[in-house]
């Protein structure tokens, strides 16, 4: 029997039935999505693209504006994260996130 060799990138052999670390991450995320929990944030849509925006409170009582964009046909695990800045108030963060999402729609940042 040949000794087991380690792959440089710890990738599964094609056709082996093994899962790569990336495949395991996607499966974990899909399981989280299928648990029936609502997706946090607000959703915006432009044509075939969706943006999920959030205003996340930080430990220093500021708010981070976050934008996640994807095609409507793709699951949440395919979202692209776009940071939109840190703001003193939650309202400012929501406004900045919405503006950044609209810019992502206009400039096709996906």
Image (cartoon, rainbow, N blue to C red):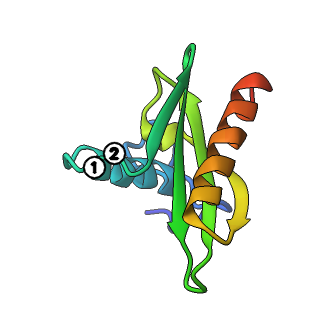
Q: Is residue 90 left or right of residue 92?
A: left
Furthest residue in direction left, as rendered: 36
Residue depicted at x 48% and y 22%: 72
Examine the rendered structure and indicate whether residue 107 appears above or below residue 20: above
Would you say 32 lies left or right of 79 here?
left
> For the C terminus, which image quadrant?
top right
- Residue 85 visible? The answer is yes
Give the residue at x 45% y 42%. Answer: 42
- On the image, which quarter does residue 93 sit in? bottom right
Query: The N terminus appears in which quarter of the rendering?
Result: bottom left
Q: Residues within 10 Å of mark 2 (few under 14, many from 20)?
A: some
Using the image, tell me which numbered label, if any, was put on residue 31: 1
Q: Secondary structure at mark 1?
A: helix
Identity of the residue furthest to the right in this view = 107
Residue 83 % position (x, y): 70, 55
Q: How many marks?
A: 2
Can I make out residue 81 in this image?
Answer: no
Q: Looking at the image, which is closer to me, 8 or 56?
A: 56
Label 2 with label 1: CB-CB less than 8 Å: yes
Residue 69 screen position, x and y as percent: 59, 36
Mark 2: secondary structure: helix
Q: Which residue is mark 2?
A: 30
Q: Position of residue 8 (x, y in %)?
A: 68, 62
Viewer-side residue, 45 vs 15: 45
The residues tagged by marks 2 and 1 sit, at their Cα atoms, a distance apart of 4 Å
Q: Nearer the viewer, residue 2 or 106?
A: 106
Dividing the picture into quarters, in which one does residue 6 lie?
Answer: bottom right
The disc label shown at residue 3, or none: none
Residue 79 pos. (x, y %): 55, 40
Q: Residues within 10 Å of mark 1 (few under 14, many from 20)?
A: few
Q: Residue at x 47, y 27 (%)?
A: 74
């Amino acid at each position: 029997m040949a000794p087991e060799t380690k792959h440089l990138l710890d990738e599964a052999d094609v056709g082996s039935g093994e899962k790569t670390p990336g495949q395991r991450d996607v499966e974990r995320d899909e399981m989280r999505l299928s648990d029936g929990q609502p997706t946090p944030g607000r959703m915006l849509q432009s044509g075939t693209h969706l943006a999920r925006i959030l205003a996340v409170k930080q430990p220093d009582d500021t708010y981070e504006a976050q934008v996640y964009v994807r095609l409507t046909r793709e699951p949440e695990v395919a979202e692209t994260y776009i940071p939109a800045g840190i703001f003193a108030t939650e309202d400012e963060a929501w406004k900045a996130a919405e503006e950044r999402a609209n810019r992502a729609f206009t400039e096709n940042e996906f």
